[in-house]
Image (cartoon, grey):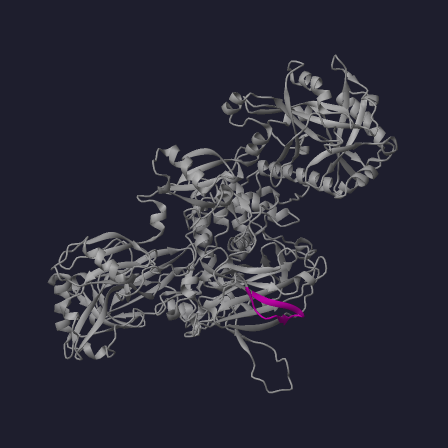
Amino acid sequence: MTLMTTPPVDQEDDEMLVPHTDIVEGPQPMEVSQVEPANTNENQQVEEPQSMKFTWTIENFSRLNTKKHYSDIFVVGGYKWRILIFPKGNNVDHLSMYLDVADSSALPYGWSRYAQFSLAVVNQVHHEYSIRKDTQHQFNARESDWGFTPFMPLSDLYDPSKGYIVNDTVVVEAEVVVRKILDYWSYDSKKETGFVGLKNQGATCYMNSLLQTLYHIPYFRKAVYHMPTTENDMPIGSIPLALQSLFYKLQYNDTSVATKELTKSFGWDTYDSFMQHDVQELNRVLCEKLEDKMKGTVVEGTIQKLFEGHHMNYIECINVDYKSTRKESFYDLQLDVKGCRDVYASFDKYVEVERLEGDNKYHAEEHGLQDAKKGVLFIDFPPVLQLQLKRFEYDFMRDTMVKINDRYEFPLQLDLDREDRKYLSPDADTSVRNLYTLHSVLVHSGGVHGGHYYAFIRPTLSDQWYKFDDERVTKEDMKRALEEQYGGEEELPQTNPGFNNTPFKFTKYSNAYMLVYIRESDKDKIVCNVDEKDIAEHLKVRLKREQEEEDDKRRYKAQAHLYTIIKVARDEDLLEQIGKDIYFDLVDHDKVRSFRIQKQTPFNEFKEELAKEFGIPVQYQRYWIWAKRQNHTYRPNRPLTPQEEAQPVGQLRDMSNKAHNAELKLFLEVGRGPDLRPVPPPDKTREDIMLFFKLYDAEKGELRYVGRLLVKLSGKPIENITKLNQMAGFAPDEEIELYEEIKFEPCVMCEHLDKRCSFRLSQIEDGDIICFQKSLPIASEEACQYPDVPSFLEYVHNRQIVHFRSLERPKEDDFCLELSKIHTYDDVVERVAHKIGLDDPSKIRLTSHNCYSQQPKSQPIKYRGVETLSEMLIHYNQTSDILYYEVLDIPLPELQGLKNLKVAFHHATKDEVVIHNIRLPKQSTVGDVIDELKTKVELSHPNAELRLLEVFYHKIYKIFPPSEKIENINDQYWTLRAEEVPEEEKNLGPNNRLIHVYHFNKETAQNQIQVQNFGEPFFLVIHEGETLAEVKLRIQKKLQVSDEEFSKVLTPLSCCFSYLVVQWKFAFMSLGQPEYLQDSDIVFKRFQRRDVYGAWEQYLGLEHSDTSPRRTYVNQNRNTFEKPVKIYN
């Protein structure tokens, strides 16, 4: 799934079980032998799923003033559910939406329920543009709601023209399927199926499904094992070793396998693991990397042998003897889904012949322009055929990507020699039988904005299919793997069969996305046996060592109930830690000596063991129990009694530990004589208390532990001054001040102790901490930054080292500052300004750190928008130590009152575009922007009238009225263009029309024609009765295009099999489809509406070559939210 409600956590290292067989030398030359089908158990029984569609109509949506808003409760599968939305976003600029367990607080301890569900915001104007996202989740007490924090941009939701909010009403839908899986948590994939799954790092299900598919191509796995690696390689720095390790664990582990080593070998960080990518793109990038890594090794060329096929692009003239061909290789084929019933229909479309005639004739060198036919034929298919189904398509009307959920069938056996080998070139090898059997089906469940990937695979090509869904592997039948992944619509069963109800149909958002076929004649070679002899010895030794460590951990955990962990703190630990590792309380128990003792061992026997360990006779030992106080401090509470010391350690642990963990924490009190040798500790009565003492040096700013004393409750601190001075190394009569360290969370509490008041009256008890220091004269106090214990402890508690980075270089630390968590906004910017030598701190703007993406947050911190440094560093429940800064040219308070717009001014007579930054008060209007712009630009004449346009992907979407407020104008994604209004547009009569004119060209990729807009769009006035020939002359003059560029030439490019359209052709464009116009056509007749046409409706298209630097607009199969896959190493 794409996005989660809980923050990411590190997964535990995976456990591994290596078969106990003799290790052989490796890697060996690749040998291929046929694999035998695995013998596995029968499928787990599951109940038929129960489903429901719930519609929630939210009226007065824009007036909702609550952060959270819940729907009514609905019941599915006997469970109560409701939808939870954040109308203004859950700390993001998107609508946030989740499915919530309505009665979670009332359910019994340990409850859980599993559901697959989709959430949607309905487009009430064009239903097909509704935004829908799918996911699945095991709900429990900790995660009782699940869904999508960035569901859809708020800017789209609240824009009435987009159709999601109509009459201030929003319609939300939820489709919930509850499948009651028996004993979900105890399910053992290895035991039930013989296979294990892969752990999901956050959004890596797409990668997991691909890795399982590749792993279950045994020839590929064998090749990976034979890639040279050494014992000195580290998996996180070597893709081959990481992949070998992963495959080895998939083959021999008993539990699911982690993929962190592999993604780290890719050079990915946590952010990459939480960004969903495209399976096809990852497949290509990974195979390219492996192909490169295999060069010069025994497995060089494996990728080509498995996956590479060839096809021939041809153009053949009809009336003359001329043919042009070019051979191309492919690793996978993209097949059309829309308009195709099945895989065969897609192949028919793939090799469909296109006629080049009329204005689209082919230029055949010495023969000139000729009628021709153009197409593709296959020269050969690979042993492993990967078919990428084009489930994602560009919608020209909406100018976005959409998912095609149409029904699309694929056969178990695919015959590409059908109908007299019509897909193959006459030159293809006729001895090869191109009959394929289906190996795996990769499924995408969800919509264009996100979803979940899993795979159906039959590893040995037997009749048994398996579903690999991240960590879980289940047996599935053929119907589930094939027919249920065709897509299309599904009809829900009738709830009241006796009534003549209209059956409810819903679109299936889970459907096949990638198919892998293996050629029948090659299957014995491809589905070969892979065993220990294929694996390098150093890999087996490394993984066997890891396995032994894991076995030790497992045994340790399994026997944990038989043992007690005893942690013993001593004076030596306090001396070592206080003032270095810790300042508050007495010791970090994780850093003291730890003993693992059988619970039945008598404590007195344990004391004898410690006597040997520490060299302290048993009679000199006294043990104190630690206790956690109500103020969350942890102190020695009381000594063990002789009766308690006679008990077994397990019983003693249970008595002392209310938390019932496996640890018993003790303080070992040892008396010391004048020669520092151990002596018996002094007798302790109820009138005696043991106190711990810390010494603070105000001049050095240092705190250290100096010892402990047994004192009388009725005694007074002043009676112990001499001893304390002796412990500190002071003169016997040195004046000192005493403070009691009371607590440090959530704030420091350290109070002055009256030396003349008894310990009883001061409420001092066993285990209390007294801090003391020399009494300082006033002059010395002023010279010390922290003159007393409370101020020093306050400083230590709040100090924070912050790494500052320039916003322009977000990966590099510029400098570090030691600050206080309670520093105000002004304190922080003043120190940053001082560090960089800036006189005016108000020109510093700070941005917080996103702990998940490891990037700056999208929005900077507003001037005095937070009170303290602590608030700047918190991201959800995580604390960062990074802040980003930038230096502004004006003070931030002034800037926040302004709206900054980046406007591209197009000169009326010069071929130039100048970008201007316009800053105006937020309440300003577009008219104010135009007035400000007039003072900055060169106009064609003093009285020229300007207008402001909104341009996006080379189309004009809006002319801003002068009265529109600028506060909500977004120039981050849209281009704001300013231009002079031509005189002819100012007084349009009934016989004139103002139309949009856009540049475009057509790109052909595997017989799929796509219209691409480019260049600068513009308006044009057309007149009634005006022919295209007349309009062309005016456009030619307006754009200053030469006559030569209007010539008709179609030129083939040598570097790739496509054609550069040099001539200018004119087309009436409607819904993205061109209708070419002749010179004699009356243009006015095509545009009958009086208003200015929207960019998504109709325009006059100018088809010609784009001579500007080429930039990809859309990737056919990449979702709009995805980033390109990159493997860095």
Q: Specify the principal SS of the magenta part.
A: strand
- In depth, the one of 709 and 29 nearer the eye is 709
Quadrant of res 706 = top right
Image side of residue 371 versus residue 45, left or right: left
Q: Is residue 749 above or below residue 457?
A: above
Image side of residue 655 versus residue 732, left or right: right
Q: In which quarter of the image is the C terminus?
A: top left
Looking at the picture, how far across and down is residue 600, in whole percent? 84, 37
- In depth, the one of 525 and 132 nearer the eye is 132
Looking at the picture, how far across and down is residue 1122, in whole percent? 43, 56
Based on the picture, tell me whether residue 649 belongs to the magenta stretch: no
Image side of residue 805 versus residue 39, left or right: left
The structure residue drawn at horizontal position 25% and vertical position 78%, both measured from the top left corner, is: 1089
Q: Is residue 595 above or below residue 354?
A: above
Looking at the picture, how far across and down is residue 549, in whole percent? 66, 37
Based on the picture, tell me whether residue 72 belongs to the magenta stretch: yes
- In depth, the one of 511 and 949 nearer the eye is 949
Which stretch is magenta?
69-83
Looking at the picture, how far across and down is residue 1013, in whole percent? 28, 63
- Residue 243 seen: no
Q: In this view, does 883 lie above or below 704?
A: below
Quadrant of res 625 = top right
- Residue 54 seen: yes
